[in-house]
Image (cartoon, rainbow, N blue to C red):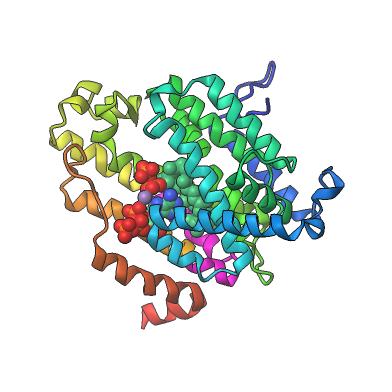
Amino acid sequence: MSNVATDHDGRPPLSSEQRVYNVILKQAALVDKPPKSRSLPSDLALDSIPVTTKNLLNEAYDRCGEVCAEYAKTFYLGTLLMTPERRKAIWAIYVWCRRTDELVDGPNASQITPTALNRWEQRLERAFEGQPYDMLDAALAETVLKFPVDIQPFRDMINGMRMDLFKSRYFNFDELYLYCYYVAGTVGLMSVPIMGIDPGSKASTESVYNAALALGIANQLTNILRDVGEDASRGRIYLPQDELEQFGLSDDDIFAGVVTDKWRAFMKDQIKRARIFFKQAEMGVLELDKDSRWPVWASLLLYEQILDSIEANDYDNFTKRAYVGKWKKLITVPVAYVRAVVPPSVTRLAATG
Ligand SMILES: CC(C)=CCC/C(C)=C/CC/C(C)=C/CC/C(C)=C/[C@@H]1[C@@H](COP(=O)(O)OP(=O)(O)O)[C@]1(C)CC/C=C(\C)CC/C=C(\C)CCC=C(C)C
Ligand SMILES: Nc1ncnc2c1ncn2[C@@H]1O[C@H](COP(=O)(O)OP(=O)(O)OP(=O)(O)O)[C@@H](O)[C@H]1O
Ligand SMILES: [Mn+2]
């Protein structure tokens, strides 16, 4: 199994960041290549799909859109601005990610075993080979046929779910970084080939992939900070153990769930780090194809505001769930639009007067 965590014989172990960067280089090289020629059965060529299958596929894409609208309304609205082909592809990937997450986080999570995840991975492979198991997989299968999406980030997301099955503590940020790549950085890598890089962009492909990875990491770190109380109630602590210790905190403090000055100081530090990842991601949004920028900006700005909300709750993420209110969301959407359509030099000039 190809896994970013594979050890290199005899050489000093690479950090998670270095391992993940190697994946970025590989993904960037793949998307730079001309369209891949997958060895698919000849009846699977896109132009030979019969009309009835096409109708079923369209129904499957519509269903993917509905799921996306149900789980992330604002983001769904943003996808409506993308070209129909891209929008459908993002929905299909969204649904695969949501279904993968539900395996370990959903109502049947207690029944999920490593074998079940292996079966899910086999299903994924079949979809990439053009042999989908159900209609939602068929939408994914068509998507990966149309766009230069590689299987590795998908496999890696399943690896993240495997990690969730046996691991409930993270010794340091290096371990947490790898987990964040698996469950969220991968989403960035899956999305870039769909959203496309602006033909006028001067940025290197790997720098855009790196920004996409950073957005995934930033989102996941934010998600972890928002859900500290909820995760602790399930016996899970994603926060790096060594950093907790540096602030004089232990697992017991988290289970006790009392906001102290030590906790506030610790949280400030964690929020600062998440914001650094959001900043890294921002540079990449400008390089995306024009009509893909708005949904990404909206998603970035909305998720980042969860950090503001944790601050506004005076760092009580034990008993309060940080969220972005309706009005803030409403304001964010046009702000994201302006950022997406106005070149950064103009907004910078406007900001400096
Ligand atoms: C435009 C855009 C945001 C596209 C991404 C669409 C997509 C395929 C999303 C899939 C998300 C998903 C269901 C992932 C499964 C694992 C998971 C749940 C991760 C957490 C998401 C937050 O979900 P939620 O708040 O609903 O959490 P709960 O389940 O309720 O706890 C994550 C925190 C991470 C999701 C990661 C991203 C959205 C990364 C987005 C990065 C890009 C789209 C790259 C943009 C490109 C550049 C160059 C910046
Ligand atoms: N899984 C996700 N992937 C990408 N972005 C997401 C995801 N979940 C949330 N977001 C971003 O964060 C925003 C807030 O998400 P949240 O799920 O709290 O609310 P919503 O579904 O957008 O709106 P509502 O509260 O009206 O249902 C989303 O609109 C989206 O932009
Ligand atoms: Mn959500």
- At a point 54% along the width and 44% down the height, the residue shown is 96
Figure check: 98 above or below 287: above
Considering the image in quadrants, where does the C terminus appear?
A: bottom left
User: Residue 206's x, y, as percent?
Assistant: 65, 51
On screen, 80 above or below 171? below
Picture quadrant of residue 237: top left
Magenta region: 275-294
Residue 240 drawn above or below residue 37: above
Instruction: Tell me residue 43's x, y (percent).
Output: 83, 49
Q: Is residue 127 magenta?
A: no
Q: Look at 51% across and 55% down and name the residue there.
A: 63
Q: Is residue 201 left or right of residue 17?
A: right
Drawn side of residue 15 relative to residue 170, left or right: right
Q: From the top left corner, tell me how far across and down residue 99 is, in percent.
A: 49, 40
Q: Of all residues shown, which one is farthest toward the right?
A: 42
Residue extending farthest front: 52
Q: Residue at x 61, y 33 (%)?
A: 19
Nearer the observer, 263 or 181: 181
| Horizontal side of residue 98 vs 305, given as left or right | right
For the image shown, how many numbered marks are present on the structure? Answer: 0
Image vertical order of residue 286 relative to residue 113, above or below = below
In the rendered view of the protein, which quadrant contains the N terminus? top right
